[in-house]
Amino acid sequence: MDTVRSALEAVKGVKEAKVDLDTKEAVVKYDAAQVKTEDLVKAVREAQGMSKYGASVKKK
């Protein structure tokens, strides 16, 4: 989903974002000194057309 990927990659400190529609998950590489996980969740929730969907962080 390019909308979600683009929204994540627009967050300062995000290096790469990969979104999988089948699993409804994204893998994000980011600089933890610049980005908080809450910033990533907010970016997804505020992405165009995503406000009705939930977003959460699943850590490894």
Image (cartoon, grey):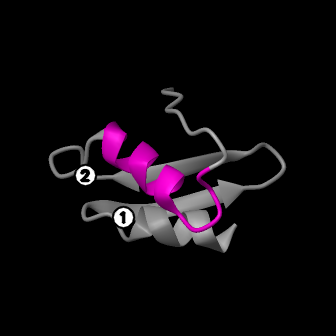
Where disc 2 sits, the SS reads loop
Q: Is the stretch drawn in magenta largely helix, strand or loop?
A: helix
Residue 47's disc is none
Marks 1 and 2 sit apart, C-alpha to C-alpha, by 7 Å
* Image location (x, y in percent) of residue 6: 51, 72
Look at label 2 and name its amino acid.
Asp
Q: Residues within 10 Å of mark 1 (few under 14, many from 20)?
A: few
Residue in the image at 74% along x and 45% along y: 24
* Image location (x, y in percent) of residue 34: 17, 52
Q: Residue furthest left?
A: 33
* Image location (x, y in percent) of residue 55: 56, 39
- Residue closest to the eye, 59 or 11: 11
Are the residues tagged 1 and 2 within 8 Å (C-beta)? Answer: yes
Start-end of magenta stretch: 37-51
Mark before the other along the chain sequence, 1 or 2: 1
Look at label 1 and name its amino acid.
Lys
- Relative placement, left or right, of 10 versus 46 is left
Residue 31's disc is 2
Residue in the image at 23% along x and 44% along y: 32
Where disc 1 sits, the SS reads strand
